Image (cartoon, rainbow, N blue to C red):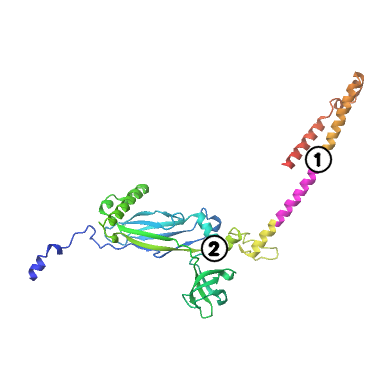
Amino acid sequence: YYYRRTLHPRPEARRRPNMTDSAAPVAPTLSPDKVLIFEWKNVANLADKPPKTILTCTNNSTGDAVVAYKVKTTAPKRYVVRPPQGVILPGMSAKITLTMVGKDAESLLSKSTRGPLHDEREANVPEALIKAAEGMEAGAKCEVRWQGKERYYAAKIRSCNEDGTFDVDYDDGEAKDKFLVQTTDLALSYREQKLEEKDDKLRQSILSKMWQELDKKIKGGELDKKTISSSRLTTKFSISDAEKEVWGGGLVPGPVVDPQVARSATDSMPVSPGSPEAIFAELSALRKKYDDLVAYTVNLTGDRDYLNNELATVKAKLERAMSKRNEAGGDGAPAAVADTKPGKAESSGFSIFMVLLVAFIAFIVGRIVN
């Protein structure tokens, strides 16, 4: 019996050959594997530099197993995923960039200045700012005055501190954004195509077709659901108090004044960017510029009135000169001849100097009006 079972095993007991048996396939790993953190770093330029994070997917196989991956989200209009799907060779990693749309980033940032975002945490909250119907213990639902402001927000007590304060987690009840990462071992027919060497557009098209075939075979019962591994990740928004203050106050981050320049001749201490002193210095500079602009406007108004008076005087002189000329012309030729003898300027009605003066005044008045 021992001889027969050892040297001549039954056919069904023989080991089936596997194309990837050089090493057992190992499930790929994700980093981070649970929570994706989107951090606001430049609130003045969210359109060009919106919050983003990097998701790393690693193929831990030491054999020839090639992993195909696909990333999906519950908020496809809020995030841009690049690349949304791809292949990973054994022992290699793929870095997937998840970027938030600038408009949504601005909306969330505006909300963060008025109240807490979901899953936002606040530490060392005094008991006087908390209303809890179930008792002041860890895990109890409550309402908390966020940052000591007047309005209460839904939260949960995370822990009770020895000094009588509490750490709380806020939850505004919104649906939290989630990401789904699906991975599978690439079939031999697709491995032979060497997708990693093809251009991105063609590779995306082939992979989309492959995932559709997999879904169809799983729904039809041809393949087990475990053929595709799925990992779910949640999102967390990280916005510092400094960024909130900059955004809420409408200030542009960065040095208001040169931090190396002293505030006064007697004070050699540099001004810190964003400090109250720096803000006051900028407001003082703007006030001075405003006063200078008002004074300049008053001067221009006075010059305008003066030039208008001069123009009216010149017009009156011209009208009198024209009237005299017309009267001289009506009395006869001798008077006209006698009138032209004192000078050619009188006979022509007005001199070249008068013409230039009128043109200059008109030019100045036109510039002032514009």
Q: Main secondary structure of the magenta part?
A: helix
Judging depth in this view, the residue of 238 and 271 nearest the camera is: 238
Label 2 sits on what residue type?
A: Ser
Whether residue 49 is visible:
no
Residue under the image location 78 percent in, 37 percent down: 361
Q: CA distance from mark 2 to mark 1?
A: 57 Å
Q: Residues within 10 Å of mark 2 (few under 14, many from 20)?
A: many
SS at badge 2: helix
From the image, tell me which residue sits under label 1. 308
Horizontal relation, residue 99 to residue 21: left or right: right
Residue ranking furthest to the top: 333
**Left or right: 330 in relation to 36:** right
Q: Residue, x 85% and y 31% (percent of image)?
A: 319
In front here: 117 or 323? Answer: 117
Near mark 1 (Cα within 10 A), the count class, few <14, some 14-19 or many ≥20, is: some
How far across and down, in percent of the image, does residue 360 sit?
Answer: 77, 36
Residue 48 is situated, as x and y percent measured from the top left of the image, at 51, 53
Give the tally of numbered discs. Answer: 2
Give me the disc on residue 112: 2
Q: Which badge, 2 or 1, is on the more N-terminal residue? A: 2
Observer-nearest of 264 and 207: 207
Q: Is residue 25 magenta?
A: no
Given the image, on which type of amino acid does mark 1 rest? Asn
Asked whether, in this view, residue 219 is left or right of residue 244, the answer is: left
Which stretch appears magenta?
287-308
Depth check, front residue: 61 or 157 = 157
What x and y, as percent, mark residue 116? 53, 66
